[in-house]
Every structure is written in C-alpha cells, then in structure tokens.
Image (cartoon, rainbow, N blue to C red):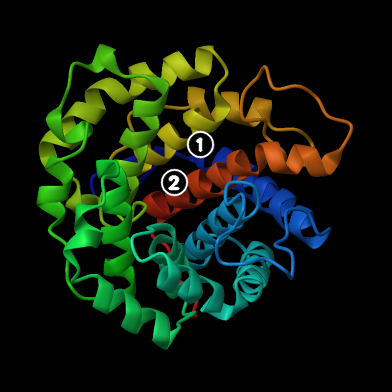
Amino acid sequence: MPVERGDEMTDTEVLATAQQLGSRSLAWLHSGYQRGYSRLEESTIVDLADPEDVYKPLCEAALASSLVLRDGVTGPHDARLARELLEAAWAQLGEGDLLLERQLRHVTLVDPLETYGHFARSGYRHAAMEELLTSIGRLRAVHAVEIQGSRHLALANARRIAGLEPRPDFAKLARNTWLGALPEPWTIAWVIAYQVTHTVFHLTDWGARPECLPEPMRDYLRDWLPVWLDIWLEIEQWDLAGELLIVDSCIGEPVTGRAGWDALTAAQQPDGMIKCEGSAPDNDDPEEDFRQHCHTAVVGVVAATVTLSRALGGTPVAP
C-alpha cells in the first residue's frame, strides 16, 4: 500500500525496510564510537596528519546524526543515539575550536566550513568560527580554489544552513557540475556517480529543498537513476547504491522501487554493519571493520532518514 504526500508516493514496505535499516545502521555507528573506535587523539593538531582516517568519518557521523534530528522521523531511542553522537563529535572537535584553528591556519581549506554546517543545523554554534567564515567568504582566493563542482555546492549549502554571508549563487554552481551538463548517461563512472549524488544532496539540502533541484536535472535523474542503481547493485557496490537511494528521495516521487532497499537490507549484517562492497574481506578486528565500513553505515542512516522524511513529513527535534 502506498503512502501519498503531495506529488510523492512511497510503498509502505519500503518505508518499513528503510526504518529498520537506518535504525540498525545508527545503532552500529553509536556502538562503535561508544567503544572508542576512530576517536581523535587528545594530541590531535589542526594539520591532521591523515584527515581521511578519523576526522572525516567523525564529521560524516555528525552529518547523519544532524539529519536524524532535523527530520524527526525516528523514534525517541534513535533520536537519543543521534544526539549522543553529535555531542561526542562536537566535544572531540573542541566544541568548534579545532575547526576554527584549522580554518585560520589554512584559509582555503573547505572541510572546516562543510563540517561546521552539520553542527549548525542542530544548534551547535561557534561565534568566532562564523565571524571568520563570513570574512574569508569575501576573499577571491576562497572562491577560486579548484575543486569539484559538487564540493563548491557543499560549501554553499553549509553557508545556507548557518545563515552566513555572502549568499551563494546556486543556479550558477549547479550549471558547473557534471550533472548540470546532462551528459550522455553511459559515460558515468564510479567517481562521477559520487559527484552526481553529492550535487543532488547539496542542492536540495539532503532532501529538505527538492524544489531547488533544477527541473532538467530532475527529469534526467528520473530517466537514468533506475539504470545506474541496477548497475551498482549488480556488482554489489553497497555504499554507492545507498547514495543513489538517497538521491531517489531528493528528486520528488521515488522512481527506483523496492529492489535497492531489499538488496541493501539483505547485505546488512545482524549487528547493523553494511560492507562498502560485496567483495570486501571479512576482518577479525571489529575496530578495523568500523574504519572500513563506517561510511556505508552513515549512508544507511541518511538514506533511511531522508526517505522517511520525504514520504511522511518530519517534525524536527528542537536543538
């Protein structure tokens, strides 16, 4: 039986599957951080010798948690886990001080702003950080940094979330992405697919603003998203498949059906872990499993949250 909301229609079995998958993924993430996995050391400095190792996963866990609280479609247990994850991440970042120091030392780095947006969304603010971001946002050097178009959109969305000046030109930024060119769909590749998903995420603020996705992009995705999802499901790229399911909920009426959700749920292990891909090796070390697959858990939480929110209409949890 479908649930209708506006111009959207989502199968209730999909919603039940999404809720279960997202809840298990969140519990697995929470458990890992509770055990002390992937924590920033007290001696961590702003230069971060390997930001991909601990810092980036921590920020991604904060993103997922912030969306759980923003959309308010989970039960009180999951909302509590999300709040605890956010609190722990904010504490590890020195309540924003590490982000401030990192941005001060490396003016053109993009990750401090993008990360700050996740916390600002849930009411964690840092006045000095916002003053700095407003100031450097007027520098030509910051806007001239040569990064992917989808990353420029990530920064623009973080500014929008935090209410920072100057206000970005989203239409211009959208045109400067791979998706904005509406390319031949068969030219997509693994890396490009991730760029496509993040273009949609940031234009729509993770599904909260579907109207901000230009209509040509929406029509293009409605045609080709089911095809792309089939490809990455066939080769068991669960992480990317999960991101494509998020896109499906950001574009309006979902077009991919149940297959992706059923496959992702079948790939999820009893403890909530989802491997990034079917061929990933088994590990005897649970901490190594956490490092390798925490991003897919984040994707599972976000996919479930956005899907439920778009279908049901969420009530944000107060910051």
Q: Residue at x 74, y 70 (%)?
A: 42
Q: Residue at x 69, y 22 (%)?
A: 280
Up-down: is 268 above or below 139? Answer: above
Foreground residue, 155 or 305? 155
Label 1 is placed on what type of residue? Val
Tell which residue pokes out farthest to the right in this image. Answer: 284
x, y (%) of residue 166?
Answer: 17, 72
| Gap in angstroms between the C-alphas marked 2 and 1 | 9 Å
Which of discs 2 and 1 lies nearer the camera? The answer is 2
Find residue 91 and report its image quarter.
Answer: bottom right
3 relative to 124 in the view: left or right: left
Q: Residue at x 19, y 36 (%)?
A: 218
Residue bearing the label numbered 1: 14
Up-down: is 316 above or below 275? Answer: below
Up-down: is 269 above or below 30? Answer: above
207 relative to 67 in the view: left or right: left
Q: In which quarter of the image is the N terminus?
A: top left
Tell which residue pokes out farthest to the bottom in this image. Answer: 127
Foreground residue, 249 or 132? 132
Q: Can residue 264 be seen in this view?
A: yes
Discs 2, 1 touching: Cβ within 8 Å: yes
Residue bearing the label numbered 2: 307
Q: Label 1, secondary structure: give it.
A: helix
x, y (%) of residue 112?
Answer: 44, 64
Q: Label 2, secondary structure: give it.
A: helix
Label 2 is placed on what type of residue? Thr
x, y (%) of residue 51?
Answer: 57, 52
Q: Which of marks 2 and 1 is nearer the N terminus?
A: 1
